Amino acid sequence: GEETNIARLSSSHPYLSLLADHLQQREMAAALKEWRDKKLCVLTSDGRVIVGVLLGHDQVQNLILNDAVECVYSPDAEMEEEPLGLFVVRGDNVCLVGEYDEAKLNQRAPFPLPSIQQQQF
């Protein structure tokens, strides 16, 4: 649709790039508003998995989670939960956000996760 066309053109014009970013932020803000007071699973850009109840967020998608725990996976052991309590995840560190479904969360990592290496282009 229209958003796809704007995203495609955004690389050629700075204004369109800003508009595409604004549309993505609006979509994320709408989703986060629906998830308020629900248990979420957050994957951070450094590979951490954090689960907690969403208390709030701001315009740059900083997330405030209550009763947060970090889920630590190991290929040789059961998942461990490290209590974090009230926890803020910076918006620029959020990679993926989704509703938490305990029934779908396995206690073991499904496969050994490869290490992530960041490269600058």
Image (cartoon, grey):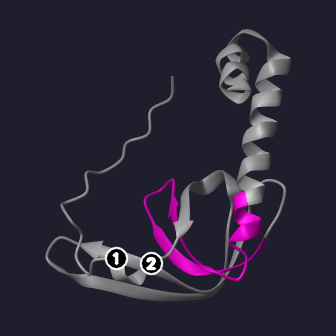
Q: Is residue 55 above or below residue 24?
A: below
- The image quadrant of residue 58 is bottom right
In the displayed structure image, the side of residue 121 where residue 21 appears, left or right: right
- The image quadrant of residue 107 is bottom left
- Residue 16, image x, y percentages: 80, 20
Q: What residue is disc 1 on? A: 105
SS at mark 1?
loop
SS at mark 2?
loop
Residue 35 colored in magenta in the image: yes
In the displayed structure image, the side of residue 28 where residue 85 appears, left or right: left
- Residue 10, image x, y percentages: 72, 18
- Residue 73, image x, y percentages: 29, 74
Q: Which region of the structure is painted magenta?
A: 31-56
Residue displayed at 70% across by 60% down: 31
Q: Which mark is residue 101?
A: 2
Q: How many residues crowd around disc 1 within 10 Å: few (fewer than 14), some, or many (20 or more)?
A: few
Looking at the image, which residue sits at the far front? 1
Is the Cβ of the residue at disc 1 closer than 8 Å to that at disc 2?
yes
* Residue toward you, 38 or 85: 38
- Tag 2: amino acid: Asp
Q: Is residue 14 above or below residue 104?
A: above
